Amino acid sequence: MTPDQIILALDVHDPKEALSWVDRFQGRIGTFKIGLQLFSANGPSLVREMRKKNVAIFLDLKLHDIPNTVAKSIEALCQLDLRFLTIHCSGGRAMMEAAAQAALPFPQTTLLGVTVLTHLSDDDVRELGYDHSSSGQVLHFARLAQSSGVQALVCSPLEVPLLRREFPPEAMKLVTPGVRPLGSATDDQSRIATPQQSLAEGSTHVVIGRPILNAPDPDAVLDSLLS
Ligand code: C5P
């Protein structure tokens, strides 16, 4: 796989550690993902610092609020010159339409609709009150996202074949967390595949965190992905 297909989830607390991962893997990983943990601890200044290193940033805040609040937040966050920014599809049509409209002046930023979080099983999805299995719910959210103007999604690797039957790559980017190289621990992810399988089935990018960050030899894990 290519560096551009890999997104490293920087799920750490310490900004120095986050920056050292960026320095270590710059050029070998296309995009670095700042999630709620790192952003809550360090805010926009860390994003600016990383952008000064000229790496692409995925800000994974999974926005979910009333349409006006989401739109205004997107206007503010897009000033940080992001490659990807997440919103929850479960926020509904009006929220996604407002989000897509707010992101229009920032063509360098792709809004990603989060479908069903990858740790949720079918039972969890039904317990939340949805009528579908998790994959049925993902398809439902994907159709809603597309008709609301959101042209890229986060989904589990297990839903990629189902989504690709309906959405060709030029119509919908698919970013998949929940990937585990052979031999890695599954941690709390439940709908998983290897990164190679996920890309072969039609993912545009894979998000990998703990299998690299917690590995005894992170460079070896990355090298095996890039070979
Ligand atoms: O460590 P791991 O490889 O499981 O990291 C996956 C990353 O992808 C985490 O940062 C997690 O928040 C994120 N994510 C996810 N499932 C989603 C959306 C994002 O696991 N549906």
Image: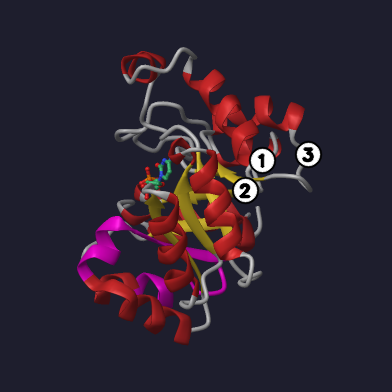
Dots 1 and 2: beta carbons under 8 Å? yes
In depth, the one of 38 and 114 nearer the eye is 114
In depth, the one of 119 and 216 nearer the eye is 119
The residue lying at 36 percent from left, 17 percent from top is 129
Residue 146, numbered circle: 1
Which residue position is annotated with label 3?
A: 168
Dots 1 and 3: beta carbons under 8 Å? no
Q: CA distance from mark 3 to mark 2?
A: 14 Å
Q: Is residue 14 visible?
A: no
SS state under label 1: helix
Q: CA distance from mark 1 to mark 3?
A: 12 Å
SS state under label 3: loop
Count neighbours of disc 3 (C-alpha within 10 A) and say few if under 14, some if 14 to 19, many if 20 or more: few
Which residue position is annotated with label 2?
A: 150
Q: Position of residue 137 (x, y in %)?
A: 52, 23
Q: Is residue 49 above or below residue 58?
A: below
Q: Is residue 79 above or below residue 176?
A: below
